[in-house]
Image (cartoon, grey):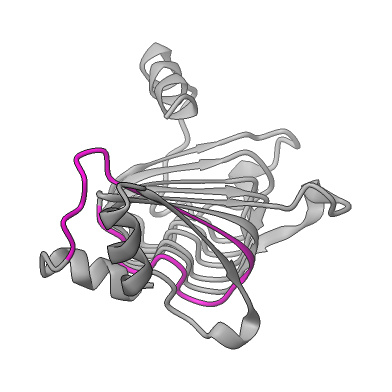
Amino acid sequence: LIDSVHRRLLEENVSLHFRLKPTMGRHFGATLAGAIARKEIPVPKEGLMVTTDGYAGGKYGFAMPSEVTLKHTGFAGDHVGEALSGGKIVIKQPDDVDNKEENYVMGHVCGVGATAGTLYAGGKSGERLGFRNSGATIASEGCGKFGAEFMTGGTMILFGEIGANFGVGMTGGEAYIYDENDNVSSKIHPESVKIEEMDSRDYAVLRTLAFD
């Protein structure tokens, strides 16, 4: 990956594409994030765009910094966007799959320990989405149990069903949840989370994020 980035930068091409396979293992992008942190790569002012397809394993986009946007078409494993540090990660289902509204596009504990940046999932996410998120924006079409667990900051946006015990230990941040089936109140952890109706400020926030 690093060799490819160096070569493309020399060619003045700031967009790269990779096809991922299950045998390629985990942590795609972590080496790139480390190289940028150590200033081993002269990142252009406009940043780097990396697109991938196939199957992204666990910890896709680990510790991704603000200079990088990752866009994946396919499905991903657990811990996507772990320690996200300002980058942008988008997981999108392939156009030819069935039952998109029911599919889990990424696994469990995604966005864990994120401090900044954005993680968008075009499908459902597994359990413990946004665990210990302290500053990132995470959007998904629903999540499993224990969403926003121990979250201290940042924003979560859920356009679909959430699992039980949402917000256990949550001490900061905000979560916007589309309550289509009028059952969110039965799934949140009442000792940690307070439900409020959206106001004009909330709608402004969502409009801004929708066009990010």
Which residue occupies the extreme front position in the image? 11
Q: Position of residue 149 (x, y in %)?
A: 42, 63
Q: Nearer the viewer, residue 135 or 50?
A: 50
Write the residue at 71% across / 35% down: 182
Pick the front one: 100 or 64: 64
Q: Position of residue 188 (x, y in %)?
A: 54, 51
**Viewport quadrant of the N terminus:** bottom left
In depth, the one of 179 and 86 nearer the eye is: 86
Residue shown at the point (36%, 48%) measured from the top left: 13
Quadrant for the C terminus in the image: top left
Q: Is residue 152 visible?
A: no
Q: Quadrant of the rendered structure where residue 111 is?
A: bottom left
- Residue 120 visible from this viewpoint: yes
Vertical order, 70 against 82 (above or below): above
Indicate whether residue 86 is drawn in magenta: no
Q: Furthest residue to the left?
A: 39
Residue 88 position, x and y percent, is 38, 48
Q: Main secondary structure of the magenta part?
A: loop
Q: Is residue 48 left or right of residue 161?
A: left
Query: Which residues are the magenta region?
Result: 41-65
Residue at x 44%, y 56% (from the top left corner): 148
Q: Horizontal placement of 129 versus 204: left or right? A: right
Left or right? Give the position of 99 relative to 93.
right
